[in-house]
Image: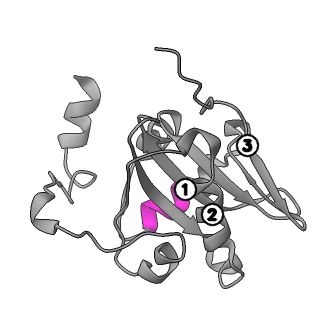
Amino acid sequence: MNMHVANPAALVEHRRGDLLISTDPARFDLDVIHNFLTNCYWAKGVPREVVARSIEHALCFGVYDGSGAQVGFARVISDFATVAYVGDVFVLDSHRHRGLGKWLMECITQHPALQGLRRWILTTRDAHGLYAQVGFTPVKFPERYMERHDPRVYETSAHEIRKTT
């Protein structure tokens, strides 16, 4: 089988004025990313090393202001053939209400390595309107979806046990 697929490791960058969205891992500011995630509702208390490992094993997008400071982020977990899960999407409070979240999601859904996927998945508590702008809809058949969720994983020693095994 000879299929041409875009390389997910290839750097992709988009500019809008002095703002930049980039997939370059060298640009990611782990301090900014971890600080946001460890304080947000969906990843409260997430250890720094878990954030670093999650970035290493995903296609990530950073948003940067004119000075090069990171002001937003998102991760995509995918097989690059059939499905993509979008997670950890954020724009810092100081840069919200400027259309950066929508632009970030547009860049993600237009990434060359993420084209032709049958399904995109994400979860959100309060950003349905943002994701609807790039084609996301409520799950049609929620009874078909299942999950295994441990909301206290970062509060317990379970994380330490997993780390050592």
Give the amino acid at mark 1: Ala
Q: Is residue 140 above or below residue 32?
A: below
Residue 64 lies, in percent from the top left, at 76, 59
Q: Mark 2 and mark 1: span between their CA atoms?
A: 12 Å
Total labels drawn = 3
Magenta range: 34-39
Residue 138 lies, in percent from the top left, at 30, 74
Q: Who is closer to the viewer here, 118 or 164?
A: 118
Residue annotated with mark 3:
12
Q: Mark 1 and mark 3: span between their CA atoms?
A: 14 Å
Residue annotated with mark 2:
106
Q: Is residue 122 above or below residue 84?
A: below
Is residue 11 toward the left or the right of residue 165 in the image?
A: right
Residue drawn where x is 68% and y is 78% of the image: 99
Q: Tell me which label, 2 or 3, sits earlier in the chain.
A: 3
Helix, strand or loop for disc 1: strand
Magenta stretch: includes residue 37: yes
Magenta stretch: includes residue 162: no
Residue annotated with mark 1:
74
Helix, strand or loop for disc 2: helix
Give the amino acid at mark 2: Glu
Q: Who is closer to the viewer here, 57 or 107?
A: 107
| Mark in front: 1 vs 3 | 3
Helix, strand or loop for disc 3: loop
